[in-house]
Amino acid sequence: MLKILGKASSINVRKVLWCCDELGLPYTREDWGSGFRATDTAEFLALNPNAMVPVIDDDGFVLWESNAIIRYLASSHGGEAIYPADPKARARIDQWMDWQATELNNAWRYAFMALVRQSPLHQDAAALAASVAGWSKHIGILERQLERTGGYVAGERFTLADIPVGLSVNRWYGTPLQHPAYPAVAAYFERLGGREGFARHGRNGIP
């Protein structure tokens, strides 16, 4: 059986959990990370030299990096409905997954650490304001994409890209800041709320 290493409150672990729900894939999970088993031990570093969760062990195949993990799971466990084999359709999905992992994540990181984690190392007012502005700017990019598709981030139908992007939208709404009116994003958030996997691992009170 698939084994997932990582605490369930981690946004990156929740990507994997939600993906498993979409695929109907059974798994076991072990708590690793802050507050649980340490990831800087020799045991864990042998699995992931970055000392970060999640890590999966799929019948001896070990993999880290959350977006790589969910791509692998969809590709190897019957997920063509959300991650099609057609190269052009897959490229559209990968494009938005990579955008989430780079552009969007970099925009929100400082603001989230300051406002949710209340990190003493992230309390510079100018840096916080810049991060909040950048975060809203990138959600605005998503707004325009959703206006074009009328449904989900890569098109009319739910795909693998909506897992990382949807969790990022959940984090945006769950962070105490001024949220510009983005009606397409709000409607998208409500659509995602109808999916059992998102209800359990996204819209569950954890930003």
Image (cartoon, helix red, strand yellow):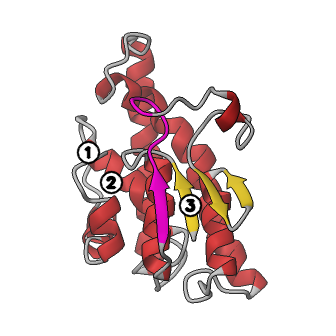
| CA distance for labels 1 and 3 | 29 Å
> In this rendering, would 147 be left or right of 154?
left
Q: Quadrant of residue 194?
A: bottom left
- Mark 1 in CB contact with mark 2 (< 8 angstroms): yes
| CA distance for labels 2 and 3 | 26 Å
Residue type, mark 2 in image = Asn
* Residue sitting nearer the eye, 43 or 207: 43
The residue beneath circle 1 is 174
Q: Residue at x 72, y 73 (%)?
A: 91
Task: Give the percent coordinates (x, y) of residue 63.
Answer: 71, 55
Q: Residue at x 33, y 70 (%)?
A: 188
Which of the two discs, 1 and 3, labels the residue nearer the N terminus?
Answer: 3
> In this rendering, would 66 be left or right of 134?
right
Q: Main secondary structure of the magenta part?
A: loop
The residue beneath circle 3 is 3
Taking the image as drawn, is residue 140 in sight? no
* Residue sitting nearer the eye, 119 or 100: 119
Task: Give the percent coordinates (x, y) of residue 19.
Answer: 49, 70
For residue 147, the mark is none
Query: For the residue labelled by badge 1, is the local secondary structure a helix, a strand or a loop?
Result: helix
Residue type, mark 1 in image = Gly
> In this rendering, would 66 be left or right of 119?
right
Task: Give the percent coordinates (x, y) of residue 179.
Answer: 26, 44
Q: Residues within 10 Å of mark 2 (few under 14, many from 20)?
A: many
* Residue sitting nearer the eye, 48 or 200: 48
